[in-house]
Amino acid sequence: GEQVEQRPPHLSVREGDSAIIICTYTDSATAYFSWYKQEAGAGLQLLMSVLSNVDRKEEQGLTVLLNNKEKRLSLNLTAAHPGDSAVYFCAVSEGDSGTYQRFGTGTKLQVVP
Amino acid sequence: DTTVKQNPRYKLARVGKPVNLICSQTMNHDTMYWYQKKPNQAPKLLLFYYDKILNREADTFEKFQSSRPNNSFCSLYIGSAGLEYSAMYLCASSSKGQGNSDYTFGSGTRLLVI
């Protein structure tokens, strides 16, 4: 089945700096890619989802880049603020019509004032 | 209401005893999922229902049961809890064919087995 690797496991940046998280996957037939944010004590919040034919998507200070040839997905938080401190997970779809998702191991992001 | 509700928020269970976790959604999603999340690990898919069809992961096939009596409700059942079951259990729902754009997670049930 699909293998998903995520790095770095921990990331600390200063407020206003950018933070980049990268995931690599193994199945080039993957159809959907997503990024989630998990704050302390909470469930996973979907940040952004992209289809495999999308190279770049931007929303509210977040940029997702997809390189299907190199099987690499990245999340870029531009101008991070302390409220962005959380654990971030990438997820890639599996199953018929991308029914279920495989997750990366998470990146704990700390944004320091 | 675009939320997935899970009950209880915290659950304490004794080794060898059964555990039943509950999840509900009112978004009319056709698919409901259960994931297990342990500290510093990726959420692990345990099983999912597409409509009335249950799909269970091969490596957790015998450890977890589930039922979905109607579209809105899905439970996760552990027949005999072991210490290794201590984890956060996350329920999610989605509609097939939406490209995961409506994939919604609940806040989770934190299970501690002692």
Image: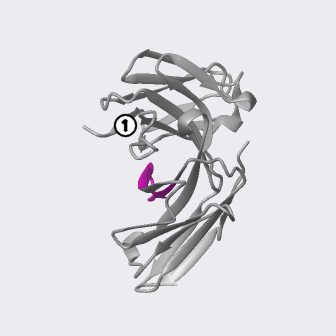
Q: Amino acid type of disc 1?
A: Val
Residue positioned 38% across, 20% down in the render: B71
Quadrant for residue A72, please give it.
bottom right
Seen as rendered, the residue at the extreme top is B69
Give coordinates of residue A30: x percent, y percent.
Answer: 62, 48
Position of A73 with respect to B57 (left or right) is left
Left or right of A48 on screen, residue B27: left
Of residue A73 and residue B73, the one placed in the foreground of this image is: A73
- How far from the left and from the top, in percent, is residue A95? 61, 35
Residue B19 drawn at (x, y percent): 56, 24
- Residue A13 inside the magenta-drawn segment: no
Residue drawn at x 46%, y 44% as measured from the top left: B99
The image position of residue A81, as x and y in percent, is: 38, 78
Q: Quadrant of the C terminus of chain A?
A: bottom left
For the point 66% across and 68% down, the residue is A7
**Relative height, residue A43 to residue A106 (above, below):** above
Q: Quadrant of the N terminus of chain A?
A: top right
Chain letter belonging to callout 1 = B
Q: How many marks?
A: 1
Quarter-wise, where is residue B96 in the image?
top left
Of all residues shown, which one is farthest toward the left?
B1
- Depicted A66 relative to depicted A113: above or below: above
Colour scheme: one colour
Q: Which residues are magenta?
A: A34-47
Can residue B65 be seen by looking at this rendering?
no
Q: Does residue A81 appear in the picture of this structure? A: yes
Q: Residue at x 46, y 29 (%)?
A: B31
The residue that mark 1 highlights is B4
Q: Helix, strand, or loop for circle 1? A: strand
